[in-house]
Image (tube, rainbow, N blue to C red):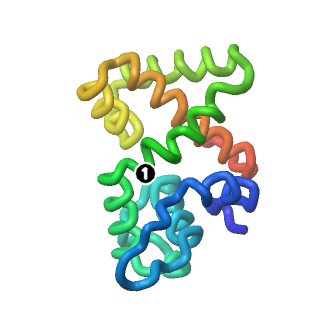
Amino acid sequence: MRRHELSDEEWAVIAPLLPTNIRGVERVDDRRVINGILWRFRTGSSWRDVPERYGPRTTLYNRFSRWRKAGVWDRRLGAVWGRITKQGDSMVRKLLYEAANSILTRSRGSFALKGWAMKIAKRRGLRKARVALARRLAVIMHAMLRDGTLFEA
């Protein structure tokens, strides 16, 4: 397993939630495609830069877009991530929420994570954006902790 890929335990949770109604040509391996999509978002790169081991970038982008339009990411997988993020230490959750608030209201620069959260704020309100950003920060920090990645300012 590589740094940005799903572990067997994570895959066991996600696999049953994926759509199974396939038409036409048989789909390529879902796990490989999801690992490619995760690689793209975890590294912040473009679709063009996703390594070939995850398959054609058009397949990754098309699957991501189709599932986004169908609500797979929000309805199905969001339920899993929501359960995970509501567990744990309340102090850590509070600090993540405060960090998200600082990013949204006090940071001066523009970067991808802030831009993503500001789009949510426009559509759903600042409170929802803070919660979404806090969850995203938790996922990033968990990945860094799991991989042993050091934070460099």
Judge from the rendering whether residue 127 lies leftward or rightward of residue 150; answer left or right.
left
Q: Is residue 9 left or right of residue 64?
A: right
Q: Nearer the viewer, residue 125 or 67?
A: 67
Q: Residue at x 70, y 26 (%)?
A: 87
Specify the amino acid type for callout 1: Val
- CA neighbours of label 1 inside 10 A, class few (<14), some (14 to 19), many (20+): some
| Figure check: 134 above or below 53 | above
- At horizontal 73% and vertical 25% (from top left) the residue drawn is 88
Q: Is 76 or 88 nearer to us in this picture?
A: 76
Q: Residue at x 34, y 53 (%)?
A: 70
Placement of the C terminus among the 4 image quadrants: top right
Residue 46's image quarter?
Answer: bottom left
User: Which residue appears at 52% of the width and 53% of the height?
Assistant: 42
Residue 64 visible in image: yes
Extreme residue toward the bottom, this view: 25
Residue 53: name its quadrant: bottom right
Q: Is residue 153 visible?
A: no
Vertical placement of residue 137 versus 147, above or below: above
Q: Position of residue 75 (x, y in %)?
A: 45, 42
Image position, residue 58 (x, y; %): 34, 75
Image height of 5 relative to 91, above or below = below
- In x, y percent, where is residue 150? 69, 45
Q: Say which quadrant the N terminus sits in.
A: bottom right
Number of disc labels: 1
Q: From what the image shows, is residue 115 above or below residue 32? A: above
Which secondary structure, mark 1? helix
Q: Nearer the viewer, residue 76 or 120?
A: 76
In the picture of the structure, the residue carrying the numbered disc 1 is 72
